[in-house]
Image (cartoon, grey):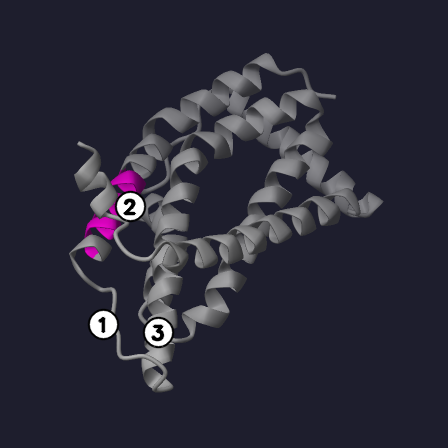
Amino acid sequence: MGRPIGALWAGPAEEFRLPLAVLAACFLAGGLAGCLLSARTGEMGEAALTELLRAYVAQAALRPAEPAPLAVVLWETFRWPLLVLILGFTTLGLLFLPLVFAARGFLFSFAVTSFVRMLGGGGAWLALAVFGVTGCAAIPALFVLGVQGMGASRALASRFLGESRRSLPYGRSYWTRCAACAGVLLVCAGLESTAVPALVSGAAGLMPLP
C-alpha cells in the first residue's frame, strides 16, 4: 500500500521541499496580514460588519440557508485550485503562485478573524462551520497543486534559460495528483451544498449574540 502512495511524490526531495516552504510562508504571511487588518478595522467599518454578521446569524438560526446553485458552488470551490493549476503550466507560476497563496491566506484569515472579533467566542464555532468543514480538505488540495505546479514552473524556466535539459514533470504522477485533488474538491462542493448549511444553522442557533 505504501509504494503506490509514495510513487505519487517520486522525485528529488528538494523538488517539493522548496516550493512547499515558499508557498507555506506566503500563505502564513497573508494570514498574518489578514489578522492584523481585521484587528485594525475602523469603528464605522466594524459596526457595519458586526451588523451584517448579526443579521447573517439571526437568519441562519431560523432555518438553514438555501444551497447556492450548483454552478456557483463549483465555481467557488474550484476557482483557486484552477488558477493554481493553470499557473503551473507557465513560467509565470514562479512569481504568481506565491502571490496567490498569500491572497488566499489573507482572505481566509480575515474572514475567520472577523467572525471571532465581531461575534465573540461563539464566532469561532460559526467560522468552523462556515469555513472549517471544506477548508480542512480544500486547502491541503490547493497546496498539493501549488507545490507541484511551482516545481513545474521552475523546470519550465530552467529549460527556457538553457540551464537544464531535464524532462518536464507533467507525467502520470502529476496528473494522478491532479485527479486526486479534483476528487477531494468535488466532495467539498457536495458538503458545501448539503452539510454546511445545516451545520451553520445549528451553530448559529446555539450561540448568543453579543
The mark nearer the N terminus, 2 or 1, is 1
Relative placement, left or right, of 157 versus 23 is left
Helix, strand or loop for disc 2: helix
- Residue 149 image position (x, y, % from top left): 35, 61
Helix, strand or loop for disc 3: loop
Q: Is residue 177 magenta?
A: yes
Residue at label 1? 167
Say the numbered circle drawn on residue 90: 3
Task: Look at discs 1 and 3 and give the one toward the viewer.
Answer: 1
Is 10 rendered above or below residue 4?
below
The mark nearer the N terminus, 1 or 3, is 3
- The residue type indicated by label 2 comes to Cys
- Residue 191 image position (x, y, % from top left): 34, 31
| Magenta-tinted stretch | 175-186
Q: Is residue 110 magenta?
A: no
Q: Nearer the viewer, residue 145 or 169?
A: 169
The residue sitting at 77% across, 39% down in the picture is 47
Q: Nearer the viewer, residue 134 or 181?
A: 181
Callouts 2 and 1 close, C-beta under 8 Å: no
Relative placement, left or right, of 136 versus 36 is left
Q: CA distance from mark 1 to mark 3?
A: 15 Å
- The residue type indicated by label 3 comes to Thr
Quarter location, residue 86: bottom left
